Every structure is written in structure tokens, then in C-alpha cells.
Image: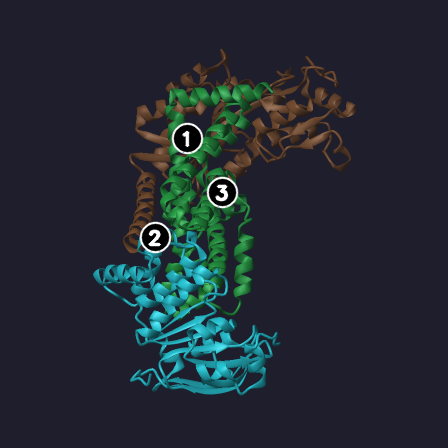
Amino acid sequence: MNEFSNAFRTAAHLLVEMDPGLLEVVLLSLRVSLSAVILAAVFALPLGAFVALTPFPGRRGVVILMNAMMSLPPVVVGLVIYLLLSRTGPLGTTGLLFTPTAMIIAQCVLVFPIIAALTRQTVFDLHEEYDEYLRSVGAGTRQKIATLLWDGRARLLTAILAGFGRAIAEVGAVIIVGGNILHSTRVMTTTIALETSKGDLGMALGLGIILVLIAVAVNTAVVTIGGGANQRTV
Amino acid sequence: MQSQHHMLPLVVNGVSYVANGKAIIEDVSFTIHDAGLTILLGPNGAGKSSLLKLCHGLWPLSSGSIRWGDADVQDVKQKQAMVFQRPVLLRRSAAENVDHVLKLRGASSAERARVIEESLQWAGLANIADMPARKLSGGEQQSLTIARAWALNPEVLLLDEPTANLDPAATRRVEDLIRSFAEAGKKVIMATHNIAQARRLADEVLFLNHGRLLEQAPAEQFMSGPSDPLAGRFIAGELVE
Amino acid sequence: MEKPRKKLLAGAMVLASLAALGSYTLLSSPKGTNITLASTTSTENSGLLGYLLPIFKGDSGIGVRVVAVGTGQAMRMAMKGDADVVLVHHRPSEELFVEEGYGVERISVMHNDFIIVGPASDPAGIKGVTDVAAALGRIRSSRAAFVSRGDDSGTHKRELSLWATLGFQPGDDDRDWYRESGSGQGATLNVASEMDAYCLSDRASWVTFGNKRGLELLVEGDPLLLNPYSVILVNPQKYPHIKAPEGQQFIDWLVSERGQQLIAAFRVEGQQLFFPDALDPTEE
């Protein structure tokens, strides 16, 4: 139980001191995970909407696959990306292994199915309601997608935040493709894993507390910025 | 009431509509020559709403044909507007809801601003232009869908039980808007199961039951004594199945 | 109203992702030179590399990026061409690594030693035993809980070879007392401390481990417990992208007088954890 009070003390200490090592790790975490989520969203939103609106053979299979991919184990994703980016792998010449870019790619793969699947569900539900209206006023496919994405923005924002939560919290993929290299690819979760393995449980837990605080801050920021729009989405 | 309306006559010829193996509309034929307000009357499940959507080209016909003036039903959506029983409103402000349809029609931004203001004014909604549409009262919501239809300046307005879920005050307000649509020279076709409403609004009545058209008559003639016995029982207030 | 906002949003998204990717591609491309060192958790977690590498960078301008994993994984990583230099501690696999052409040459750098730690209550009664085989024999015959790394690391391989001197190979019958954690040294020590179990550890990891609780150092000093570290340059003839000159420079520096003195000077809580081997080969 001592560990818990110790952890809070460590967390407070790190925060008050604005520990530069901590700051570096936090900033890298944020940049990697935010980039991964934005990148994933740019492609997953239209794809999810497309699958929701366009009947094609095998669509059920695609939907099941998208939903199932939400539970991809990060370690497996990390391993696959590792093998792809490894010097002897098919993308080895890019030299991206053990770089933040590799971590962004891995997290992007993890987050993509979450955003795509939740987007599909959101757009599908909304389309049930809007379909006759949209056809009545003669909207084309792109206009339909734009309308449905915009009107689903509150739920899509939640989907994106869910994706961000998965990205910022996962350790399995980034530790494999990033290598947890000091000053280069060390992020919050890999630091926590490292401190745990050093037996410095207070520090590990303290960092965990800071990770949660950062997640709260990001969510608050997004909800506040999106707040004006949110009111009209009831 | 004879008009130069070039969407008329509406000619519905031998139309059937089958969904999931069940005949919803069976071999319905009629012609509407005149502008003004036509009411599709009948008990719930008579096929009024389906017939309306077929006339708007929303659903494919199982057989038969529908023509508006010289055009096939599939080619005239742009000249029509439809109002649904449950108002379909986007998750945006009232003004943005009107803006949405104008943008789909490719109106310029100056034009859009003008039309939004005019149509909200017309529907008595100017004061709630910036309110989230889905926070409005039921009557305001349905008025807004009619204002949105007005903004499109359609030649034909189709309404599917627009007041079914409204209280009397809101119903009066919506009926006034519908009437003023018809008075502006638009063709209005509206489905209702409410005989009193038909009496208040109709210039012409089409009486349907079980997917079949039983009678078409001018409103006065229909209300004073329909030739179809079932229609007679219906306007007498009996429960018709 | 909606269109400009949407455009703005889309624009911001694209910009942000491009900026993010761009900055990383730039960041990750070598500013100055970086080499990748695949090493063991013991050298990283003890702080030795954190102490040496900035000095090396000051001397040479070469940055060393450390990926700290087990010896087995470090060498597999190098075999795929994903590291320039390995710093590991399992002689047989090192020799095989060089023999198969993956490494240029195995060069001894330093050693520390393995120890056996266990609960203070010491149910197997091994405290102070200097013969490691005897100590392991007592653990086995008393069937006291023992946690193995089980991760194909240098320490794991050493542990198995120590058991092998008793003619013993852990099997299914030993599940009640012989547990494999399947993780790094620190995590394995955490498990041992939680289960009051015995465990083989390198001294550096033990000294720097922060969650000892009821664990104590029980057995040390047997020559069989010596833990020599070697450094190997990955063969540039196998993988042309290997940064051979810089890697060689790092190796030369490690075994130079300066490097060796620095290793000897490294202390944690007043204890010397690593002993240089390169200058006087007779010492080992």
C-alpha cells in the first residue's frame, strides 16, 4: 500500500519539477499518438462511411472483419510492422525501424479499425434516419457522406477519442517497433514498462497517474473545442 | 383551378408495389389534372404513404407507370419537395437545415442567405433560426421541414401525415403553411387518415383502403356523399379496417 | 457556415499529419551519425550505458541508440540486420553468431557475475554456499520455489547450463516449484519477490532493482557464475547498410584504456558492477 502513496508523491514531484526527461517522454507520446489517430481518422472516416452506404458483395464480411480488428493485440501488430520494417523485411530500405514514424504506423494500424468500425455504425444508424430525406433532395454519394459524417460528429469524435485512448495507452506495439530508445522512441508506456522491470514500482505508477491526467486533459480539450458543435448534435 | 402547371397532369397507371412478398399497392390508376390540394385519405395501412413515396420516385414501382406532365417520375424529384410524418431534421441549427438543401441545389451564398431568411420568415421561424433544429418543439420542427421545402421553391409538395404527432395548435400552424403553399400555385398532395383535416384542407380527395383506390372525387362531393360505401362509413366516423 | 469550418478541419487534419510524419522522418534521419546497439537489459537498466554513451558521444560525435532486450533477442535482431553492434553475454551463441557470418569478431569487454537471490527465510538453506551447483541441488531437492527467466536471454541460458551440471533439465514434473516468468530480469525479480522464490540474476540488475522486499543475495562467488560481456560488430558484408566504421569506432572506444577505466569507475550505490576485461586478458 506504501506503493500507492509513494506513486502519488512521485507523480506530484515529477509534475511540479516539470522534469525535463518526463516532458520529453510526454511530448513524444502525444505527438506519436495524436499523429497516429489523425492519420487513421483521415482514412477511416471516409472508409467507414463508404462501407455503411454502399452495398457490395462481401460487405457483411468486411463489417465483421472491421469489428473484429478492433481487438487486434498490439503485440501482434507491433511484430508484423517490425517484420515489415526490419532491414531484411520488404520495407527495410526505408530505415524506419526504431523511429517514431514506425511507432506512428503501428498505432495507426491499431486505431484504424476502431475509428472505421465506429464510423460505419454511426453513419449506418444515421443513414436509416436520413435516407429518404437525402434521396428526396437529390443528394449524391459524396454529399450524403459529407452530411452523415458532419451530423455524426459528436459520436465520431467519441470514436476518435476511443482510438486515441487505445493509442496512448498501448505498450506492446511501440516497444517492439520503437525499441524504447532513450531520447528517441521512449514514450510514457514504454517508460512505465521499463520502470516496472527495474522494480521501481512507485515511479511506474506515478507515470501511470500522469498518463491518466494527460488523457483527461486531451479529452477535456477536445470536448471543449468541439463543444459549440456538440450542442447542436442532440 | 385549371392551371398551366407543367408538372400536371399526374398520371398514375396500373401501379403496384410489393415489399417482402406483400402487396402494399395493388393496381392503382388515377389522374390528377388540377393544381390545389389533393388529399390521400384512408385508414392506417391503406397505402397512402407508400403511394406518396412512389409518386415522389423514392421507391421503385413493382409494375405500372407514373408520369408527371411529360416526365417520368424518376426525373422530377428536383422539382418536388417531400415532408415526412416524422420530421427528418439534421443535427444543426434551423437555418443550417435550410442551408443544406440550398447548397445541394448549388445556390450561391448570397442567394442562400436571402432564401434562408425569407423561408424562415414565411414559416414564422425567424426568431429561432440559430436554435438547434432538434431542440425545437414538434410543431416548430414540422414547420421547419415545410420551410425547408418552401426554400426549394418546388412545383409539387408531397406531405405524409405531417400533423399526425402534433397537438391542435401546432396542427393549425402547419395546416396554414400547407394552405399557403397551395395558394401560391403549387400542387400539394397530402396523405392523412384524419377526416376532419381532409374536410378543412382538401380540394380533391382520393380514398384508399388496403392498397386499392376506392374513390376519387372533388372534396365537396366526396364529403357530402361518397359513392363508395366504405368511404361513406369512414366519413361517418366508423372504424374502418 | 458549415463549409468553411469543414474545409478548415480537413485542412488542419492533413497539415497536422503531414507535419507529424515529416518531422519524424527528419528526426529519424541521422543528424550527425547514430548507430543502433542491441544490448541486454542488465547493461541498460543498471545505468551503465546511460553513463558511458554520452561520454562516447562527446568524444566521437557518434550517438548510440540502445535497444535493450535479452541476449537471444538482441542477436536475432542483429541477424535481421536491425542493429549495428551487439553487446551481449552468452559465449556459445556469440561464437555461433560470428561463425555463421553475422558478426565480424567477438571482443571481450567486461564481466560481472551472476548471483542467486531468494527469500530471507531461505527454505532450501543455501545461504553462504559457495558452490553454485550444490546450492541449486538443495533448491531442487527441497522443491523450493524457483523463478526462471524462461526468455532465451543470456541469463536464462546460463541458468539452464548450471542446472545441466547437475544432470537436471526442468520438465513437467517440476511445475510445482520451477516457474518460468518469460520476461526480463526486473520482471522476474518482481515475480520472485512476490512468490518468495529463488532466482538467478546478474549482479547489476539485482543491485539496481528497487523492489527487493524480502529477497536477499544468498549465493555468490563461484567461478561458474562469472558473466562475461562481449561486443560484436554486425558483419557489413552481410548487410551493407551496417554503419561499420562508426560501430567499429564505438567498439574500439569501449576496449580502449579510456573506455575500460570508465567501466571500472561506474558505481551504483557505491558498488562496482562491471569489471573491465579488455586490457589484461589474463585477468579472466
SS class, disc 1? loop
Instruction: Evaluate whether residue C106 shows in this view.
Output: no
Mark 1 is on which residue type?
A: Leu
Protein chain holding label 2: B
Percent position of residue B109, x then y: 23, 60
- The residue that disc 3 covers is A166
> Closest to the observer: B68 or B201?
B201
Numbered-mark total: 3
**Chain C takes which shade in the image?**
brown
Circle 3 Cα neighbour tier, 10 Å, few/some/many (<14 / 14–19 / ≥20): some
**Chain B takes which shade in the image?**
cyan
SS class, disc 2? helix
Q: Residue A32: name its quadrant.
A: top left
* Quarter the N terminus of chain A occupies: top right
| Scheme of image coloration | by chain
Q: Can you tell which mark lies on residue B224?
A: none
Residue at the farthest left position:
B110
Badge 1 and badge 2 in a common chain: no
Q: Nearer the viewer, mark 2 or mark 3?
A: 2
Tell me the residue at 64%/19% (across/down): C117
Q: CA distance from mark 1 to mark 2?
A: 57 Å
Residue at the farthest top position:
C270
> Closest to the observer: A75 or A170?
A170
- The residue that disc 2 covers is B128
Protein chain holding label 1: A
> Closest to the observer: B115 or A57?
B115
Mark 2 is on which residue type?
A: Ile
Q: Which chain can be seen in green?
A: A
Q: Nearer the viewer, mark 1 or mark 2?
A: 2
Q: Is residue A5 left or right of residue B117?
A: right
Q: CA distance from mark 3 to mark 1?
A: 23 Å
Circle 1 Cα neighbour tier, 10 Å, few/some/many (<14 / 14–19 / ≥20): some
